[in-house]
Image (cartoon, helix red, strand yellow):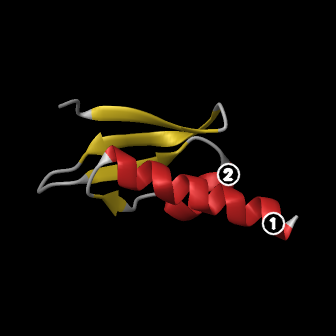
Amino acid sequence: MSDTYIIEVGSQPAGIIVRAPGGGYRFFAASHRFNRLEGQIFRNAREAERAARQLASGMAQAA
C-alpha cells in the first residue's frame, strides 16, 4: 500500500493524500476549488476521491 496518492477529478488535479500518523490519509488541495477538503482525514484513497468528485459536482451545479 502506498503512502501517497494523487487525486484527480475529470483529469484535473484535486490534491494529494498522504498517510497520516495514527491511520487514514490527510488531504492537501492542489487548487483552490478543493480547499474545503484541505486537512481532512480519509480512511482510504477511494473515500478521498469520492469526496473530491462530490465537491466538484456541487460546484458545477452552483455555477
Give residue 14's quadrant in the image.
top right
Q: Residue sitting at 39 percent across and 62 percent down?
A: 40
Q: Which dot marks residue 32?
A: 2
Closer to the eye: label 1 or 2: 1
For disc 1, the marked residue is: 61
Q: Residue sitting at 58 percent across and 53 percent down?
A: 53
Of the residues shown, which amino acid type is indicated by label 2?
His
Q: Which dot marks residue 17?
A: none
- Count how many numbered circles sit on residues in the image: 2
Residue projecting furthest to the left:
22
Whole-number angstrom distance, CA of label 1 to CA of label 2: 17 Å
Q: Quadrant of the C terminus?
A: bottom right
Assign a secondary structure to mark 2.
helix
Give residue 34's quadrant in the image.
bottom right
Q: Position of residue 61 (x, y in %)?
A: 81, 66
Assign a secondary structure to mark 1.
helix
Q: Residue sitting at 67 percent across and 51 percent down?
A: 32
Q: Position of residue 27 (x, y in %)?
A: 41, 51
Q: Residues within 10 Å of mark 1 (few under 14, many from 20)?
A: few
